[in-house]
Amino acid sequence: MVSLGWGFCFVQIAVMDVPRVLNALDRGFLMIAPMARISFAAFALTVAWTATVHAQDVPGIEICTVEKTMERRTSCLQSNVDFLQKTINKLTTDHQQKIDAANRQIEALKGAVIGLQKVVGELQAAQNKAAEDAKKSAAPAAKDAAPATKDAAPAKDGTK
């Protein structure tokens, strides 16, 4: 059985019946650009390889009540405990790193706030000084203007 289909069906046929598939490839598949052929071949080999890989024990929580012997139950429970301890340790270190990064950021922000408070204090001092200078310069001008009005004679209303 030869199929020119794509995907898993093609890979399955390619693994089972290599000569027929190669004959089919010679007819129509060679028209495709070389990069597409290489990519598809890599994909086909990857899928074929993963189909032959045997199942591995994936760490995680297992249901230990299905085990009949006490040794297997104990082993199952111990693997669950080991998995949980590793998970807790990993989460602890991850969260500690996040807390340390947050503390460093807080310290940097405290330094920025102190710097900004210093700048605000300097600006307020400069503003107060400018206001005092404006008052002092306005006060002598008012004193100069006041004696000039005293020296001038008052106007008489009844002149005819």
Image: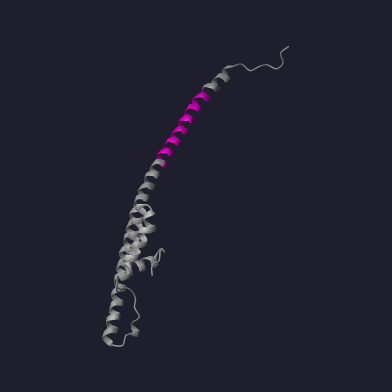
Q: What residue appears at the point 54 percent right and 22 percent down from the top-left corner?
A: 145
- Dividing the image into 4 quarters, which one contains the C terminus? top right
115 to 143, vertically: above or below: below
Residue 70 location in percent, x, y? 28, 87
**Residue 95 appears in the picture as rendered:** no
Tag count: 0
Residue 35 location in percent, x, y? 35, 53
135 displayed left or right of 84: right
Q: Which residue is at the front of the view, 52 or 73?
A: 52
Q: Which residue is at the front of the view, 68 or 22?
A: 22
Which colour scheme appears in the figure?
one colour
As drawn, the residue found furthest toward the top would be 160
* Magenta part, dominant SS: helix
**Residue 80 appears in the picture as rendered:** yes
Q: Which residue is at the front of the view, 149 or 51?
A: 51
Residue 136 falls inside the magenta stretch: yes
Q: Which residue is at the front of the view, 31 or 23?
A: 23
Residue 71 falls inside the magenta stretch: no
Give the residues drawn in magenta, as a range.
120-143
Residue 31 location in percent, x, y? 38, 54
As drawn, the residue found furthest toward the right would be 160
Q: What residue appears at the point 40 percent right and 44 percent down from the top-left corner?
A: 116
Q: Quadrant of residue 157?
A: top right
Q: Quadrant of residue 159?
A: top right
- Dividing the image into 4 quarters, which one contains the N terminus? bottom left
Q: Quadrant of residue 84?
A: bottom left
45 to 74, vertically: above or below: above
Residue 6 location in percent, x, y? 41, 63
13 displayed left or right of 151: left
39 to 78, vertically: above or below: above
104 to 141, vertically: above or below: below
